[in-house]
Image (cartoon, rainbow, N blue to C red):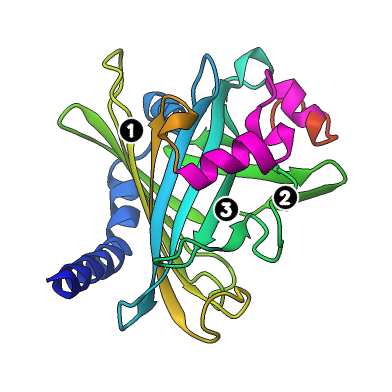
Amino acid sequence: MARLRHAARRLGLLALLSAAAVAPAARAHERGFDAAALEAWALAHGGRDAPRTYAYEGTVYDLPSGRILATLDGWQLARAFPGGVADPGAWYVVRRAFLLYRAPGSGEILAHYPDVRASRMPVPSLSIVRYVLRGDRLVPTAVAGVRGAIRDVSLPEQLGAAREDGAWVFRRVLTPPDPRQKPFELTEIVAQPGPSGAAPRIRFAMTKVADNWGFLPAGGRHLLHLSWRPVAGLEALAPVVRRLLEEDAPPALGTLPATLDAAYGELGLPRPAGGR
């Protein structure tokens, strides 16, 4: 029965990937973003008045066998900032995050993300993503890293927004420029606007080739399925994640800059006038 459940789940994920590869682009064309959708998108990724904590959990499957190769646990701290008078109409999402890839059954930590080559928890990085409208398209630009090691992040993505049963439904298709590493990503976010307090539901699927991920079989093709949800505090995280945050991780991992200017300052960059 467990094998049947795993097979059904794997088939469902594959159907999600194949069906959504075309649908989000069509939906983005039929219903583009507007200012309300942009605000809802940004606030689904982080708190506006204070940082929001998220818990990650997921599974890495071998394709096409469906065998479980690793499980994932992780954490994210994120905040959304409006551009304000300096950058009217734009929204920024500032975040820190990490994932632990773990051996099925034993729970042994196989690798850390964002640096899967690190034997210990890597130095915490910070990312800043700016979203702005061009017509009815949502255009992102981003920087990420630590002071002295900053990179511009290319996001060749297609984003679609729709209203369904009073909620915002966002779908993102990401087709990275190097198909040998991450051929396809799909994210779906369902966010309830207004004062209801309902947490956004977020799921993520990605196919990948593992040549640069030493803990996975070389040359294989794998499917990563990940969900993340807002949580009230560290007690809602997986014990191994909570222990890292409380005992082993660099102190900066548990904090975010209080302002957008401070976030750029942490990266050693001036905040661009009028956005990036």
Q: Secondary structure at mark 1?
A: loop
Secondary-structure class at tag 3: loop
Q: Quadrant of residue 237?
A: top left
Report the amino acid beneath label 1.
Pro
* Residue for point 65% across, 22% down: 87
Categorize mark 1 by other alpha carbons within 10 Å: few (<14), some (14-19), many (20+). Answer: many
Residue 21 falls within the magenta-colored stretch: no
Q: Which mark is residue 152?
A: 2
Q: Is residue 254 above or below residue 220?
A: above
Q: Position of residue 77 (x, y in %)?
A: 56, 33
| 260 lies above or below 124 | above
Nearer to us of marks 2 and 1 is 1
Outermost residue toward the bottom in this view: 219
Q: Is residue 201 visible?
A: yes
Which comes sooner in the sequence, label 3 or label 1?
3
- Residues marked 3 and 1 touching at CB (< 8 Å): no
User: Where's residue 276, x and y in %?
Assistant: 70, 36
Q: Which residue is mark 1?
A: 200
Residue 276 visible in the shown view: no
Tag nearer the camera, 3 or 1: 1
- On residue 155, the disc is 3
Callout 2, which amino acid?
Answer: Asp
Would you say 187 lies left or right of 190 here? right
Measured from the top left, where is residue 37 in percent x and y? 37, 30
Q: Position of residue 92 (x, y in %)?
A: 59, 30
Residue found 35% across the figure and 55% down from its top: 25
Dot 3 amino acid type: Leu
Query: 13 above or below 239?
Result: below
Write down the region rendered in magenta: 239-265
**Mark 3 to mark 2: distance in Å?**
10 Å
